[in-house]
């Protein structure tokens, strides 16, 4: 009886649809189809089965109270963060980050962080860090954005983007305390442009902004990313807020007006006149999430309805997209 019970138990264990045996059973569907199904599932659903694989068993540890001089790569979806936290070169009480940008270099399959560091003497230095490497690389002659509302570059199509008014001659500033030369460079354009930095080849260029006829821009242009397209908005003629999408990145002719929101409607919704508006996200049902310095509000492209969301904030919000990315650093 003991031997028969042992065979029965082994047979039941082999046929059990749970545990490690499930992973070794012959799949009923082709691998390509299984992959397509899994790729369409929400990250939270996939995480329910992370105990089947050692890949997803590492949990997020509490961040160190020291985020002042270190850079951490974090994926909240799978509760993972990079073990290495590189410090920024030449960063101390007399220097600070003025502009930054984070994005994915699809050519080299690397994540990169760009930082513009300023000092108390007016000098600036641009450096880029590639996650997985132990050092920062200096970007020479980088034309620092001037007058941009947001210091964080908008990431789209492998590039980081800022609005900038670029004009004037080169201006070199030497730092007496060290061997580094800090450069303040301006391009030759005489109009508002987008400063575009390509993460793969680590070069920059100008991208033209839309110039609609009969429009007097009454505020700084503000960038955002909607549906993987670069978006810019501005106060138009002191009567509307104008929103444009660049349907094909880098092609000025692809700028298309997305919407115009009457200023009166904005004042009625927010109860104050915003100094700037930034587009954050556009849903599948054509609702656009916007923000000012302290408020969020929604605009419906279908019916023109504008709703101010309750509460206020004092932080710099970013849109987070769920993923299973856990690079090996």
Image (spheres, rainbow, N blue to C red):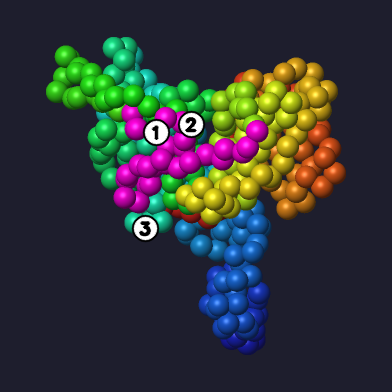
Q: Who is closer to the viewer here, 69 or 3?
A: 69
Frontmost of labels 3 and 1 is: 1
Residue furthest to the front in view is 214
Q: Is residue 199 left or right of residue 309?
A: left
Do residues under tags 3 and 2 come within 8 Å of each other at their CB atoms?
A: no
Q: Is residue 278 above or below residue 227?
A: above
Question: What element does badge 2 sit on?
Answer: strand
Crowding at mark 1 (Cα within 10 Å: few <14, some 14-19, many 20+): few
Q: Residue at x 38, y 47 (%)?
A: 198
Q: Residue at x 66, y 38 (%)?
A: 243
- C-alpha distance separating marks 3 and 2: 30 Å
Q: Which residue is mark 1?
A: 189
- C-alpha distance separating marks 3 and 1: 29 Å
Crowding at mark 2 (Cα within 10 Å: few <14, some 14-19, many 20+): some
Q: Which residue is mark 3?
A: 107
Question: What element does badge 1 sit on?
Answer: loop
Q: Is residue 110 above or below residue 192?
A: below
Q: Is residue 63 left or right of residue 302?
A: left
User: Is-magenta flag for residue 158?
Assistant: no
Q: Position of residue 56 (x, y in %)?
A: 51, 55
Q: Is residue 177 left or right of residue 317?
A: left
Q: Earlier in the sequence, mark 3 or mark 2?
A: 3
Q: Residue at x 19, y 18 (%)?
A: 174
User: Is-magenta flag for residue 191?
Assistant: yes
Quarter of image, res 277:
top right
Do residues under tags 1 and 2 come within 8 Å of each other at their CB atoms?
A: no
Residue furthest to the left in view is 179
Q: Quadrant of the N terminus?
A: bottom right
**Span shown in magenta:** 186-214
- C-alpha distance separating marks 1 and 2: 8 Å
Q: Position of residue 36 (x, y in %)?
A: 60, 71
């Amino acid at each position: 009886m003991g031997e028969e019970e042992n065979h029965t138990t082994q047979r039941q264990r082999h046929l059990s649809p749970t545990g490690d045996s499930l992973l070794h059973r012959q799949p009923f569907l082709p691998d390509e189809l299984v992959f397509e199904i899994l790729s369409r599932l929400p990250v939270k659903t996939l995480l329910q089965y992370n105990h089947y694989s050692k890949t997803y068993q590492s949990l997020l540890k509490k961040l160190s109270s020291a985020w002042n001089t270190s850079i951490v790569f974090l994926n909240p979806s799978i509760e993972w963060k990079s073990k290495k936290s590189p410090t920024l070169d030449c960063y101390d009480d007399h220097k600070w980050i003025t502009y930054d940008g984070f994005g994915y270099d699809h050519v080299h399959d690397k994540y990169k962080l760009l930082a513009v560091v300023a000092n108390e003497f007016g000098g600036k230095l641009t450096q880029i860090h590639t996650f997985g490497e132990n050092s920062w690389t200096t970007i020479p002659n980088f034309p620092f954005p001037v007058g941009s509302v947001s210091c964080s570059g908008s990431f789209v199509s492998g590039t980081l983007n800022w609005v900038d008014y670029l004009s004037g001659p080169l201006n070199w500033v030497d730092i007496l305390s060290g061997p580094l030369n800090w450069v303040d460079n301006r391009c030759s354009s005489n109009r508002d442009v987008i400063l575009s930095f390509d993460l793969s080849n680590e070069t920059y260029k100008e991208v033209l902004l839309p110039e609609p006829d009969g429009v007097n821009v009454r505020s700084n242009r503000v960038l955002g990313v909607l549906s993987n397209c670069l978006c810019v908005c501005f106060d138009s003629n002191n009567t509307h807020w104008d929103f444009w999408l660049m349907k094909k990145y880098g092609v000025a002719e692809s700028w298309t007006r997305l919407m115009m929101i009457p200023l009166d409607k904005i004042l009625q919704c927010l109860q104050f006149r915003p100094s700037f508006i930034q587009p954050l996200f556009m849903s599948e049902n054509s609702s656009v999430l916007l923000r000012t310095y302290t408020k969020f509000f929604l605009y419906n492209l279908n019916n023109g309805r504008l709703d101010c969301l309750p509460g206020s904030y004092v932080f710099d919000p970013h849109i987070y997209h769920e993923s299973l990315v856990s690079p090996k650093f």
